[in-house]
Image: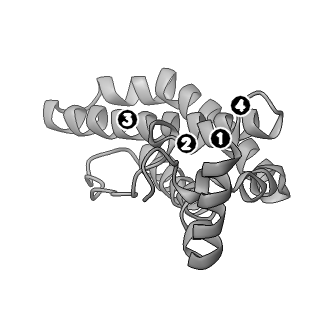
């Protein structure tokens, strides 16, 4: 990497903007926001009641899973909102490429058999959404760089000498 030059994916705003504007992104954005609303309603309503009726061990599993679920959904929401901000011209593609705004690899621990079926169902849906958004992230920021290493190097040079 050339000193002071951002990675090639940061110099490829067209790829990022194309993906952020795609219909798949819009559907995923809507699905993510809807799932957040659904999870919030469950955890604040029926889920809270279910948790009160559980044994101490089961309640601990419920709490751990609900925390993992909400954390995962907040990461997805932050990523989706950042990409929408790029599409709307509020944020630059280079800023969105910052590792702070990127998703990590999905790692899903096994669900405890003690969590209620509804929580398990919501968790599996959130995991699938996270996997899909993670693939979108890789397509926008990783695979675009790896697709053509020569073009990537040329774009790095253009970016370096454009300033």
**Could you tell me which secondary element the residue under label 2 belongs to?**
helix
Residue neighbourhood size for the residue with mark 3, other residues' Cα within 10 Å, grouped as few (<14), some (14–19), many (≥20) = many
**Mark 4–mark 1 contact, CB under 8 Å?**
no
Considering only vertical position in the picture, is 126 above or below 40?
below
Q: Residue at 67%, 34% (x, y): give it.
A: 81
The residue singled out by tag 3 in the image is 66
Badge 2, how many Cα within 10 Å: few under 14, some, many 20+?
many
Q: Quick one: 153 or 16, which is closer to the camera?
A: 153
Q: Is residue 81 above or below residue 127?
A: above
Q: For this rendering, which residue is in front, 139 or 59?
A: 139
Identify which residue, 102 or 162, lies in the foreground: 162
Q: How far is disc 4 from disc 1 in space, using C-alphas?
A: 13 Å
Quarter location, residue 106: bottom left
Residue at (49%, 38%) from the top-left corner? 75
| Marks 3 & 2, CB-CB < 8 Å contact | no
Residue that carries the numbered disc 4 in the rendered image: 91
Q: Is residue 24 above or below residue 92?
A: below
Residue that label 1 marks: 80
Q: Which mark is first along the chain, 1 or 4?
A: 1
> How far apart are labels 2 and 4 at the CA level?
17 Å
Neighbourhood count class around disc 4 (C-alpha, 10 Å): few under 14, some 14–19, many 20 upward: some
Measure the alpha-carbon separation of dots 3 and 1: 21 Å
Residue 76 marker = 2
> Which numbered disc, 4 or 1, marks the residue closer to the eye?
4
Kindly report which numbered mark, 3 or 2, lies closer to the viewer in this rendering.
2
Question: Left or right: 66 with respect to 161?
Answer: left
Inter-mark Cα distance, 1 to 2: 6 Å
Q: Considering the numbered disc 1 on the image, is that residue within a helix, a strand or a loop?
A: helix
**Which image quadrant for residue 77?**
top right
Secondary structure under the numbered disc 4 in the rendered image: loop
Q: Are marks 2 and 4 in contact (CB under 8 Å)?
A: no
């Amino acid at each position: 990497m050339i000193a002071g030059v951002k990675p090639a994916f940061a110099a490829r705003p067209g790829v990022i903007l194309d993906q952020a504007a795609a219909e798949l992104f819009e559907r995923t954005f809507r699905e993510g926001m809807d799932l957040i609303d659904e999870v919030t309603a469950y955890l604040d309503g029926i889920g809270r009641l279910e948790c009160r009726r559980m044994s101490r061990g089961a309640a601990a599993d419920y709490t751990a899973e609900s925390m993992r679920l909400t954390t995962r959904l907040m990461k997805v929401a932050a990523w989706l909102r950042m990409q929408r901000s790029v599409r709307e011209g509020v944020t630059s593609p280079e800023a969105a490429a910052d590792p702070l705004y990127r998703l990590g690899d999905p790692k899903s621990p096994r669900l405890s058999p003690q969590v209620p079926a509804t929580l398990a169902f919501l968790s599996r849906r959130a995991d699938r959404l996270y996997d899909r958004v993670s693939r979108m992230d890789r397509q926008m920021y990783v695979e675009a760089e790896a697709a053509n290493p020569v073009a990537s190097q040329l774009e790095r040079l253009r970016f370096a000498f454009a300033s």
